[in-house]
Amino acid sequence: MGALVTSRAEEVPTLPVIGDERIGVLLLNLGGPETLEDVQPFLFNLFADPDIIRLPRLFRFLQKPLAQFISVVRAPKSKEGYASIGGGSPLRQITDAQAEELRKALWAKNVPAKVYVGMRYWHPFTEEAILQIKRDKITKLVVLPLYPQFSISTSGSSLRLLESLFREDEYLMNMQHTVIPSWYQRGGYIKAMADLIEKELQKFDCPEEVMIFFSAHGVPLAYVEEAGDPYKAEMEECIDLIMEELENRRITNAYTLAYQSRVGPVEWLKPYTDETIIELGQKGFKSLLAVPISFVSEHIETLEEIDVEYKELALKSGIQKWGRVPALGCEPTFIADLADAVIESLPYVGAMAVSNLEARQSLVPLGSVEELLAAYDSQRRELPPPVIVWEWGWTKSAETWNGRAAMLAVLVLLVLEVTTGEGFLHQWGILPLFR
Ligand SMILES: C=CC1=C(C)c2cc3[nH]c(cc4nc(cc5[nH]c(cc1n2)c(C)c5CCC(=O)O)C(CCC(=O)O)=C4C)c(C)c3C=C
Ligand SMILES: [Fe+2]
Ligand SMILES: [Fe+2]
């Protein structure tokens, strides 16, 4: 259920109607498997997303079979990871708690709003949250992705899904709404991050000698260089702002940014976290403080990848003292800032009423996300034509048989790829995702 999120339902006051208005906030997030049985279907949902695996247009019909194949092959390794952090992702629980704290902060600031959670790949799905929003007859909606920096693969994917849901539904089309596409530059968020870093630095014997190691989730390089994803630029600006805030507190440590969690053999944003850790060890750094920067909840990549894998690598590479800044979670300065972001965006929701035509065309009043997504789509159209072109018959039955022949050919190609290690899917960087 994408319902009003609360730990104890009876404590939630009934949503007052101000005039005719009912305000809602929709938090968008990735979602994670709650049990080990959820892992494979969760992975299927993730890989079936064309914003995660970008196939050329002619091969889109392969998206789901490919997602099925990759998810089945990858599931055992992923399950091991989830088993090691307690048998499932903590993401739903943390996001629900953030939603409840945000609701309280909004009510405390005299903005009585309902807060909904819509996950992209697992429960509560975005579609469920939208159903609940309609049931509650929300009239003004603020859409807030829980990713500080925008990426096509995260906020972009969720917004694309929302846009398609909005287009199909008369009620949603007419609902006033606005989106906060990214918020990495907000003062409260920057301050909250700096507070956490400052606190963790104090746990080292010589805090001023610690290398502050920002580890962001990576994306394939082509997203940034070909599709125009602003993720890297926003990430770099975000880190500059945090370091400025620390400098104002006379904390002038060395710092660096690297990208973690790459999947498959295509080039991802560099430098890579693992390679950077080894280099820092070689350069003689002895103390590292890891700062997860692209996500505001603990999840498998903080709890397993950073806390276990990267720590082990660091210790092997000559680092003697390793620390890690916790994810923001329900940190009060951060939640208060999210509440302010929502409140500041409310006039834009009103503005949508003035130009409802715009509201019908785009989720975003200023058009920024629509422009980003449009740029991304035009990149997709410009991809070179695939080598195989199916140009057989035009009758219905011929098309059916062509489809079957194509599927058979694809299966043969898959078997050949797996056995020889070469082929189209390797060239597109897809097949090695299986491992
Ligand atoms: C800002 C954060 C994230 C970006 C950008 C991102 C891009 C991205 N991710 C994959 C593949 C996988 N991601 C997986 C889990 C996962 N991803 C993020 C965040 C970002 N992903 C989080 C927080 C999580 C963990 C959720 C949880 O359960 O705690 C997984 C599944 C885990 C695994 O098997 O390793 C995959 C696979 C790609 C390909 C991509 C960019 C194209
Ligand atoms: Fe991911
Ligand atoms: Fe990942």
Image: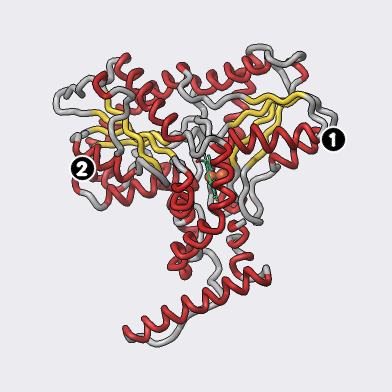
Residue 358: percent from the left, percent from the top?
Answer: 28, 44
Q: Residues within 10 Å of mark 2 (few under 14, many from 20)?
A: some
Label 2, label 1: how far apart the Cα atoms are: 59 Å
Q: Which amino acid does label 1 sit on?
A: Gln
Where residue 44 is drawn, which disc sits there?
none
Q: Quadrant of residue 93?
A: top left
Q: Can residue 348 be seen in this view?
A: no
Where residue 282 is drawn, which disc sits there?
1
Q: What element carries label 2?
A: helix
Q: Is mark 1 on a helix, strand or loop?
A: helix
Residue 379: percent from the left, percent from the top?
Answer: 51, 58
Residue displayed at 56% across by 35% down: 85
Q: Nearer the viewer, residue 57 or 309?
A: 309
Q: Can residue 285 be seen in this view?
A: yes
First in sequence: mark 2 vs mark 1: 2
Q: Which of 93 and 374 is in front in this view?
A: 93
Q: In which quarter of the image is residue 25?
A: top left
Residue displayed at 30% across by 38% down: 2
Residue 97: percent from the left, percent from the top?
Answer: 40, 26
Q: Is residue 378 above or below residue 147?
A: below
In the image, the residue with mark 2 has its CB under 8 Å from the nearest atom of ligand 1:
no
Which residue lies under the disc numbered 2? 174
Q: Residues within 10 Å of mark 1 (few under 14, many from 20)?
A: few
Quadrant assignment for the C terminus: bottom right
Q: Which of 29 and 359 is in front in this view?
A: 29
Residue displayed at 50% across by 30% down: 296
Residue displayed at 71% across by 27% down: 255
Residue 77: percent from the left, percent from the top?
Answer: 59, 50
In the picture, measured across the screen, residue 209 lies left or right of residue 85, that is right
Q: In this view, does 213 lie above or below 169?
A: above
Q: Is residue 254 above or below residue 154?
A: above
